[in-house]
Image (tube, grey):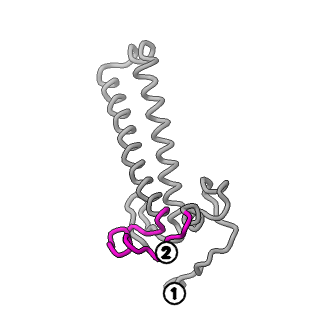
Amino acid sequence: MDHHCPWVNNCVGLKNHRYFCQFNFYAILCMIQCTLFISYDIFINDKLVLQELTKNQQFILTICNVTCFALVVVMGFLLGFHLYHIAQNITTVEFHINEIKANNPFKKPRIVDNFKEVFGPEIKYWFLPIRNAEKSAFPRTDLFEV
């Protein structure tokens, strides 16, 4: 286990770090889509849409647009932070240990090898939430599982 994530109400670790990053990626895409559609209605298509809305509705639409954009930025930083961890082959807990930052024994020579360890050997499946066909070098069961 790496850490508990309140966003997904689950612990993020070795077995689900890939899915956590994919969740962030898809959520960012969704927020980008919402931001673009709302911005289009506010700034480009303003004569048709804004004339039919009251001032309160226009205000709420603007607040929704600002919130979606803020979520894109914040979740983008979160995804970038975790992609950096994958590139360095460290966990969030190990990120706060200074010895790991200086001499990381787990870091592979190529960054793509670190990504393959988390996302799987086939790059074409990295964005799909499917299980890797290749067996992992790590055991599938823990001592605490029934």
Give the farthest residue toward the bottom: 143
Badge 1 element = loop
Element assignment for label 2: loop
Of residues 91 and 28, the one drawn nearer to the viewer in this rendering: 91
Residue 55 got which mark? Answer: none
Disc with the residue nearer the chain's start (1 vs 2) = 2
Screen quadrant of the N terminus: bottom left
**Segment tinted magenta in the rendering:** 87-110
* Residue at image coords 47%, 45%: 28
Q: Please name the residue that numbered disc 2 is placed on.
A: 106
Q: Give the answer, above or below, for where 12 lies relative to 70.
A: below
Observer-nearest residue: 66 or 9? 66
Q: Residue 86 at what x, y percent from top left? A: 49, 63
- Quarter of the image with the C terminus is bottom right
Q: Amino acid at mark 2?
A: Phe
Residue at x 42%, y 16% (from the top left corner): 46
**Is the residue 47 above or below the residue 28 in the image?**
above
What is the three-letter code of the residue carrying label 1? Leu
Residue identified by numbered label 1 = 143
- 7 left or right, relative to 15: left
